[in-house]
Image: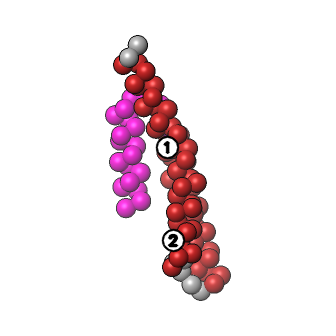
Amino acid sequence: MFSRSFGIRSLVLISDGSDAGKVTTVLFFVIQVLGMSLERIFRQLSGKRVGGPWGLLWTWTWILITAQPVCESAVTRQSSQVSVLFT
């Protein structure tokens, strides 16, 4: 599932034709692997899986922080395309 999501996002960027966002997208997916590794370390140390309200908080915090560069890149790319249309 993880690699499928990365593949779809990469195809969208390639079809877009712009270089903006490609590095941030790859970086986002690499950082997600780090988050999954941290969850595995937590499970090995505590014997418990990440879950419940604290797990939900961990997941949303991690995604919101790591997704910011990708979102900024997408907004920048879209705003530059809109400005080209109206100039």
SS assignment at label 2: helix
23 in the magenta segment: no
Q: How far apart in space, not on screen, are marks 1 and 2 (Cα)?
A: 21 Å
User: Is disc 1 in contact with disc 2, using a CB cutoff of under 8 Å?
Assistant: no
Q: Is residue 22 above or below residue 86?
A: below
Residue at 57% over, 61% down: 61
| Amino acid identity at mark 2 | Leu
Question: For this rendering, which residue is in front, 69 or 56?
Answer: 56
Observer able to see residue 20: no
Which residue in the structure is indicated by mark 2? 56
Q: Earlier along the polypeptide chain: callout 1 or callout 2?
A: 2
Splitting the image into 4 quarters, where does residue 80 fall?
A: top left
Dot 1 alpha-carbon crowd within 10 angstroms: few under 14, some 14 to 19, many 20 or more: some
**Residue 29 image offset from top left, x and y in percent:** 50, 53
First to last magenta residue range? 1-21
Observer able to see residue 74: yes
Which residue in the structure is indicated by mark 1? 71
Question: For this rendering, which residue is in front, 35 or 71?
Answer: 71
**Residue 43 image offset from top left, x and y in percent:** 58, 80
Residue at 41% over, 51% down: 6
**Residue 54 image offset from top left, x and y in percent:** 57, 75
| Amino acid identity at mark 1 | Cys
